[in-house]
Amino acid sequence: MGAEKQSSKGQAWFCTTGLSSDMEIEVDDMTYHLNKFLLMSKSRKLHQLLTEQEQSDEKKKRHEEEGDGYTPHIRLENFPGGPEIFEMVVKVCYGVKVNLSASTAVLLRCAAEELEMTEEYSPDNLILKTENFLSHSVLSNTQETIAALKACEPVTSLAESIGITKQCIDSIVSIASSSADPSLFGWPMNNSTKQHSKVLLSPVLSEDLLELSFPIFKRVVQAMKAKGLSDNIVETSLIRYAKKHIPLITSRSSASSTIASENQQRELLETIISYLPVHNSSATSTTRSLFGLLRSAIILNTSEKCRTVLEIKIGSHLEKATLDDLLIPSYSYLNETLYDIDLVERLIRHFLENDAVSFLSSPSLTVVGKLIDGVLCEIASDSNLKPERFYSLAVSLPDEARLYDDGLYRAIDIYLKSHPRILEAEREKICSVMDFQKLTIEGCTHAAQNERLPLRAVVKVLFLEQLQLRTLVTAVTEEDGGETAGEAKVDFGVWEKVVKENEVLRLDMDAMRTRLYHLESEYLNLKEVIAKIDKERLYVANARPRKWSISNKFGCKFKTQVCDSHEAKMVDGRCQRR
């Protein structure tokens, strides 16, 4: 019904219905040449503006005096939806049918409000038509409602004042709660939920919801909480929104995110985390997602309160974490270690404070024990890891967290191998965190031959091996037969192999003692030779101003006695055995 033309003043729109065009309305860079009566009959605001202009326009008086025609001109600033929506308003005024969608209906409703196209002014007007369309064709359909809610963003103030935003939000939350369909927020549906769901929603809906601006999305979350939706749905929707708009959380974040600066991302992340349910015992969101939020919070330098909220949530379900989750790099220059060990210790503390692990026999406790042993193995080779830091992390869990100490022993062995220059006292302290009675056969065998362990630790292992062997032999002897006896004999065979290996080890130790004894004997013989040389040159030394001896020459001093590991003693200058 209309045609556009280009002019020096911009684009012009002319009606082709044959009706006269006796007024001009300018919207942005488009000028519409329209019939004054049709628009004034539908819009109270246009009627008022035209009336005021005709009564006070000096330009009209001048044209009337000169006998020229006059065309009133009105400019509409910041019109909702711009020229596209105003053209649809014109078509409605001209009685032309228009095709509506969720987004155009919202903008037309705002435009009708702006132009005061009410029922009181003219029956069957645009406000009523758009409200009927929204009620019957949009708000009853979740996908259309989300599209309408997104259309409210460029006209936030006007849409809020006439209640469209609230209607859309209430409709979304109401449908989600009444239909028991968590897939709206990206929540996986089980078979039971699908069977009882009244409305099956497309998976794309959750993505549409994530496209909303955060102020509106935040209002959706608030409505979800007020409606009593489960913490699972609230938490999952928030995490999915964060992943969508904060690239640091996951490499698969949307490239179309409008949140570019770090300050905006920090503000968004802090707000999202503040809305997360703190105590959600039934949360099924992946711990990996929470760790992604935590890493981003550290990198973006969010507030300490923000990070603490995440650490408490992660710590309460630490048994669901993986080794990769806990290996968070040290982003602060204050930390010398490769990974953030302080963070791991805080997570363990939050885990132990949780009521679910108050019982020492909790299965989750042993899961976390294995997890922390894995962390210790990974960080043990860090050259900047001090002994006290390794020790502190190793003892952060109670003894009941480890059924066997093989994992802990492996971490200790890696640490001692990577830090050969630590003091003997530090070695013994590190080894003290391990209970040798909780080592398996393989662990005992390895520890008994481990040169890196302190001597006291090796002695403990050998003693415990003998004690266990004696207990096992006694048990086998008392066994009457049957399947249990057969299993015991198999174990006895394994222990027999261990004993043989220990015998080899003891032979090696005896050989070392014998060699030490020969070295001590050679040392004593050498000392006697040196003493004899000193006596022969004594007269020369008396003739000189100062004494001379080979010991003074080389600055050496020798003790008169020595004792080896076989308890030798000095008798008349010779070493005799007891």
Image: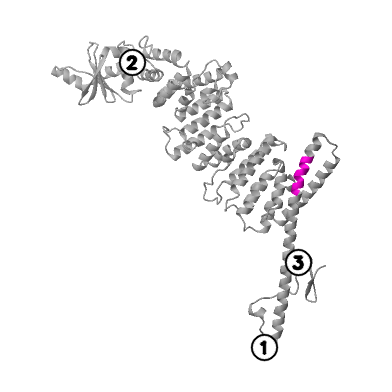
Nearest to N terminus: mark 1 or mark 3? 1
Q: Nearer the viewer, residue 270 or 253?
A: 253
Q: Is residue 390 left or right of residue 220?
A: right
- Residue 325 point in image, percent of width and height: 57, 39
Horizontal arrangement in the rendering, residue 391 relative to residue 275 (left or right)? right
Side (left or right) of 108 relative to 378: left
Q: Is residue 305 above or below residue 436?
A: above
In the rendered image, residue 354, in percent from the top left (x then y), is placed at 66, 36
Q: What element carries label 2?
A: helix
User: Is label 2 in contact with label 1 (beta carbons under 8 Å)?
Assistant: no
Q: Residue 281: image x %, image y %?
A: 63, 30
What's the residue type where badge 2 is placed?
A: Arg
Looking at the image, residue 326 lies above or below residue 459: above
Mark 3 is on which residue type? Asp
Q: Name the residue beneath numbered marker 1.
A: 540
At 45% from the left and 12% from the top, the residue drawn is 136
Q: Name the residue under label 3.
A: 564
Give the mark, 3 or 2, whose residue is nearer the N terminus: 2
Observer-nearest residue: 129 or 567?
Answer: 567
Q: In the image, which residues are magenta?
A: 489-498
Q: Going by the picture, which residue comes out furthest to the left?
A: 66
What is the distance, in whole Å, between disc 2 and disc 1 at their CAs? 134 Å
Q: Name the residue under label 2.
A: 44
As drawn, 207 above or below 112: below
Against 531, residue 408 (above or below) is above
Q: How crowded is mark 2: few (under 14 residues within 10 Å), some or many (20 or more)?
A: some
